[in-house]
Amino acid sequence: MQDQHIFFMQKAIELARKAFAHDEVPVGAIIIDANKKIIGTGYNQVEKKQSQLGHAEIIAITKATKKMNSWRLERCWLYVSLEPCAMCINLILLSRIEGIVFGASSPKFGYQLDKEGLISLYRRNTIQVLQGVCQTESALLLKQFFQQKRVKE
């Protein structure tokens, strides 16, 4: 199972590199279905879209729901290189995603900063969360991006 998580997280990190190349915060996300088939992909496009709706998770979920022809993504898993924010975690919960695997923690915007703040109506205690898969690689990519940003300023 760990090999599977690493395999799919590497795919998310590839998308994060694509975001980096487009001068976006390097976050990538994929969604797999119950058959372990990738049904949605996304990378951050907040600057390009000039919208918070450009988060990698939102783009991947949108593509997956179109592919599945349903807003319910039951038995699906989300792999994302950075811990989801509060907005994205609520979308994940509403989408009925079974589990999340993420790489790096987000010390400023991660959903875990305010677990009690999640809207209890949508909270599902059954969602599985696995954190820290390919954490070093995910965190290094983010660190490089922000170091580069500081140099440019």
Image (cartoon, rainbow, N blue to C red):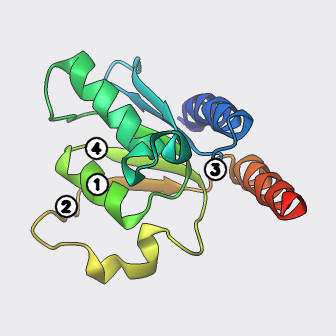
Instruction: Tell me the amino acid under the disc marked 1.
Output: Ile
The span from disc 4 to disc 3 (Cα, nearest Å) is 26 Å
Q: Residue at x 46, y 27 (%)?
A: 41
- Please tell me the numbered disc located at residue 98: 4
State if disc 1 and disc 4 touch (CB < 8 Å). Answer: yes
The span from disc 3 to disc 2 (Cα, nearest Å) is 29 Å
Residue that numbered label 1 is attached to: 127
- At label 3, counting other C-alpha atoms closer than 10 Å, the crowd grade (few under 14, some 14-19, many 20 or more) is many
Q: Give the mark nearer the N terminus: 3 vs 2.
A: 3
The front one of 120 and 42 is 42
Q: Quadrant of residue 10?
A: top right
Q: Quadrant of residue 24?
A: top right
State if disc 1 and disc 2 touch (CB < 8 Å). Answer: yes
Q: Is residue 111 left or right of residue 13?
A: left
Residue 104 versus residue 11 in the image, above or below: below
Instruction: Tell me the amino acid under the disc marked 3.
Output: Val
Residue that numbered label 2 is attached to: 124
Q: Position of residue 60 (x, y in %)?
A: 39, 33
Residue that numbered label 3 is attached to: 25
Q: Residue at x 23, y 27 (%)?
A: 65
- Please tell me the numbered disc located at residue 13: none
Instruction: Tell me the amino acid under the disc marked 2.
Output: Arg
Q: Residue at x 18, y 51 (%)?
A: 94
**Secondary structure found at label 4:** loop
